[in-house]
Image (tube, rainbow, N blue to C red):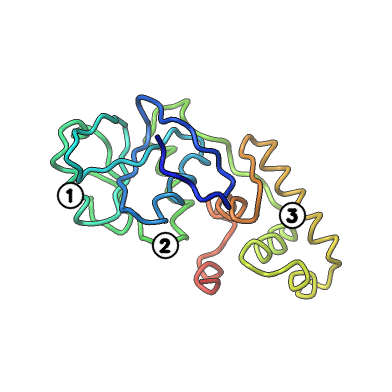
Amino acid sequence: MTADVNQDLQIPMHPLPPSSTVLIVAEDSLADVGLLALVERFGYRAALIDVGGAEPLKQTGSVVIVRSERRLAQLRRVAALASARVIGIGVPVGHLGGVELPDSGYSAGSLRQVLRRIVAPGATGSDRVHLSPREREVVVTYTLGSTVRETSQRYFISESTVRSHFRRVMNRYGEAGRPVNNKTQLLIQLIADGWVERDRLVSAV
């Protein structure tokens, strides 16, 4: 089974497929769930795996994402994943022929591009959803934590206009086959499509 997903994210749980395209090495933190949701929103089958457990690993995949030196060392001892392509987030994997990405929210767009490049054709998700410059500034401000009132005051628009932008962008993602139900899910998609600049993410933390 997949890891339990926080109810607030409104992401339904479902049984793991017998074979997953993208495997995410679990670090036993909430970030595991966020990364799993992000990869699945990209349109890939994904699963969390425990490479440090006593039980033999039953999952297989073409790509494995690892985020710590300790888990990377454990991963290298798993024979079943010897042929999988490794993506290291904040971990050097170049010596293994893998792809290295920095550990930051800004890397979400890069992760999507890497997965699109190395995962088998037919397993990829939808293309980037288009936002107008105005939609982008209003919706990004709102999803990064501002209230409807704060957002409307910042851009000198009505609160109903903020809500309209938000609903319109959510509908656009739904039409693209990437439905979102709340601000958190929409923010994940905006990051994945590269609509949120690095400095906005850093300042929002």
Instruction: Residue at 70% x, 36% y: name it.
Output: 175
- The Cα–Cα distance between marks 1 and 3, rounded to whole angstroms, is 44 Å
Lower sequence index among marks 1 and 3: 1
Q: Secondary structure at mark 3?
A: helix
Mark 2 and mark 3 in contact? Answer it, CB < 8 Å: no
Label 1 crowd bin: few (<14), some (14–19), many (20+), radius 10 Å: few
Instruction: Residue at 53% x, 41% y: name it.
Output: 41
State which quadrant residue 117 falls in: top left
Q: Which numbered circle lies on residue 104?
A: 2
Disc 1: which residue: 95
Which kind of residue does numbered mark 3 sit on?
Phe
Mark 1 and mark 2 in contact? Answer it, CB < 8 Å: no
Residue 184 relative to residue 37: left or right: right
State which quadrant residue 24 falls in: top left
Nearest-to-viewer mark from 1 and 2: 2
Q: Secondary structure at mark 1?
A: helix
Nearest-to-viewer mark from 1 and 3: 3
Instruction: Residue at 73% x, 57% y: name it.
Output: 135
Query: Can you say whether 30 is above or below 5 in the image?
Result: below
Task: Choose between 60 and 28: the one closer to the eye.
Answer: 28
Label 2 crowd bin: few (<14), some (14–19), many (20+), radius 10 Å: few
Residue 29 relative to residue 192: left or right: left
Residue 94, image x, y percentages: 22, 50
Q: Which numbered circle lies on residue 44?
A: none
Which kind of residue does numbered mark 1 sit on?
His
Q: Secondary structure at mark 2?
A: loop
Which kind of residue does numbered mark 2 sit on?
Ser
Residue 158, image x, y percentages: 86, 67
Disc 3: which residue: 166
